[in-house]
Amino acid sequence: MKRLFQAFSPLALLKPAFVALCLLALVACASVANQSTKLDQAQYAWSAAIRWGDFEGAMNLIDPEVRKKIELTPLQLERYKQVQISSYRDVGTSTDMDAGKSVRDIEIGVINRHTMAERTVRYREVWRWDAEAKAWWITSPLPDLWEGQ
């Protein structure tokens, strides 16, 4: 009888529940780590595209819903070809993985190819996590390298 009582003691019942809880926590941590890695990869791809002047390629990282509204005209693409990006620096980041949102403030060095004049432009990237696609999308348009001019 004592052996039967030990098999069904509250401690014996809590052990499998504790193991299951630990496994669930590990899966959750792995999911957040995977989401974080994907954010790093998406931000790296975006900054590389901007840094190397691949603005058409950068458009592929913009949220598809946003992209539909901001298609680049041939004239706008030609304007981007008139500049060279000399630097792309992250000057501040705020990320909330639970909310699926990340914001980065960026400082971009821009050189006019015709005048060789360099200037600095500030830009804010806003990223959102798409749980269905398991991908991060930037919801900001391409940087305005002319600041409205």
Image (cartoon, helix red, strand yellow):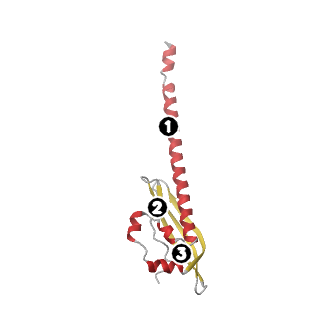
Q: Are marks 3 and 2 in contact (CB under 8 Å)?
A: no
Residue sticking out furthest to the front:
74
Residue that badge 3 annotates:
122
**Label 2 crowding class (10 Å Cα cut-off): few <14, some 14-19, many 20+?**
many
Choose mark 1 or mark 3, whichever is in front: 3
Q: CA distance from mark 1 to mark 3?
A: 45 Å
Report crowding for label 3: few under 14, some 14 to 19, many 20 or more residues within 10 A (C-alpha).
Answer: some
Residue type at mark 2? Trp
Q: Is residue 86 above or below residue 99?
A: below
| Vertical side of 52 occupied by 133: above or below | above
In front: 16, or 131? 131
Q: Position of residue 147 (x, y in %)?
A: 49, 80
Q: Secondary structure at mark 3?
A: strand
Q: What amino acid is at disc 3? A: Arg
Q: Secondary structure at mark 2?
A: strand
Residue 132 rendering spot, x and y as whole percentages:
42, 52
- The answer to the question of whether label 1 and label 2 lie on touching residues, with beta carbons closer than 8 A, is no
Q: CA distance from mark 3 to mark 2?
A: 20 Å
C-alpha span from label 1 to label 2:
32 Å
Instruction: Work out whether residue 74 or residue 55 is closer to the camera in this orientation and state it.
Output: 74
User: How packed is label 1: few (under 14 Cα within 10 Å), some, or many (20 or more)?
Assistant: few
Asked where in the image residue 73 lies, by quadrant, the reply is: bottom left
Q: Is residue 120 above or below residue 8?
A: below
Q: Residue at x 49, y 40 (%)?
A: 24
**Residue type at mark 1?**
Leu
Q: Residue at x 43, y 63 (%)?
A: 63
Q: Residue at x 57, y 63 (%)?
A: 44
Which residue is disc 1 drawn over?
Answer: 21
- Residue where numbered disc 2 is placed: 137
- The correct choice, above or below, for 37 with respect to 47 in the image is above
Q: Nearer the viewer, residue 118 or 11?
A: 118
